[in-house]
Image (cartoon, coloured by chain):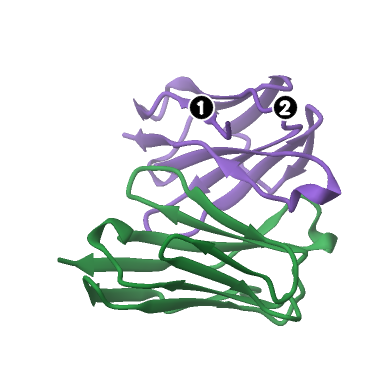
Chain colours: A green, B purple
Amino acid sequence: TQLLEQSPQFLSIQEGENLTVYCNSSSVFSSLQWYRQEPGEGPVLLVTVVTGGEVKKLKRLTFQFGDARKDSSLHITAAQPGDTGLYLCAGARRTSGSRLTFGEGTQLTVNP
Amino acid sequence: DTEVTQTPKHLVMGMTNKKSLKCEQHMGHRAMYWYKQKAKKPPELMFVYSYEKLSINESVPSRFSPECPNSSLLNLHLHALQPEDSALYLCASRPQGRDRGNTIYFGEGSWLTVV
């Protein structure tokens, strides 16, 4: 059972377009992280959200945590080729101790 | 500073070899992790150390042996691996404490190829 559904799995867009990636669950998370990973490198933390309804912005990236803390979204405005990579959401639940639940990832390609 | 350092960056080993992957962090984090990741898939948890004690072993085969010599170091000893063990091995650490959001910080990974 996949506890954190991430969509879309693949996304190929042109430079300048906007996009949104979603992570959804029927479980409540105490916090949720978004990472970006490039081939052969480790995931790099983009943001942690902990409060229901929280919105965080990082330049052209906007992250939102659902009011019920069961879902999250990542919106990229005016995507650039440098945004290309694997985007991972990962949630922590109070009942899971040290474990994180990962989504399956979204492979984003931004074409010049 | 949120740096987790892994060595080596790349490792090629035969199925009869013994090698080790090393990880170091100086952020004072008391939880350290080993993950295995295949291409374009999410990381899979292998081991968790909490306050230098092994707290989680996700039924990992005994050919992988973790070691935590002190609060800053984490090793993964490899012996008699199989070609299907080839993957990116990620070390990670997490600060303890309720107000830290359970954020895990990853190293750059060690690419392992078993031949």
Chain at numbered mark 2: B
Q: Amino acid at mark 1?
A: Thr
Horizontal arrangement in the rendering, residue B54 relative to residue A85 (left or right): right
Q: Which residue is the extreme one toward the left?
A: A112
Q: In this rendering, which labeled residue sits more in front, label 2 or label 1?
A: 2
Label 1 Cα crowd, 10 Å radius (few <14 / some 14-19 / many 20+): many
Which residue sits at x=46%, y=34%?
A: B81
Which residue sits at x=64%, y=23%?
A: B26
Residue that badge 2 annotates: B28
- Label annotation for residue B5: 1
Out of B104 and B7, give the one closest to the viewer. B104
Which of the 4 image quadrants contains residue B69? top right
**Where residue B87 sits in the image (x, y, percent)?**
41, 44
Give yes or no for contact between labels 2 and 1 (Cβ–Cβ under 8 Å).
no
Q: Amino acid at mark 2?
A: Gly
Q: Are marks 2 and 1 in one subunit?
A: yes
**Where residue A73 sits in the image (x, y, percent)?**
54, 75
Which of the 4 image quadrants contains residue A20? bottom left
**Where residue A39 sits in the image (x, y, percent)?**
32, 49
Out of A68 and B21, give the one closest to the viewer. A68
Horizontal arrangement in the rendering, residue B8 relative to residue B63 (left or right): left
Residue B88, placed above or below residue B52: below
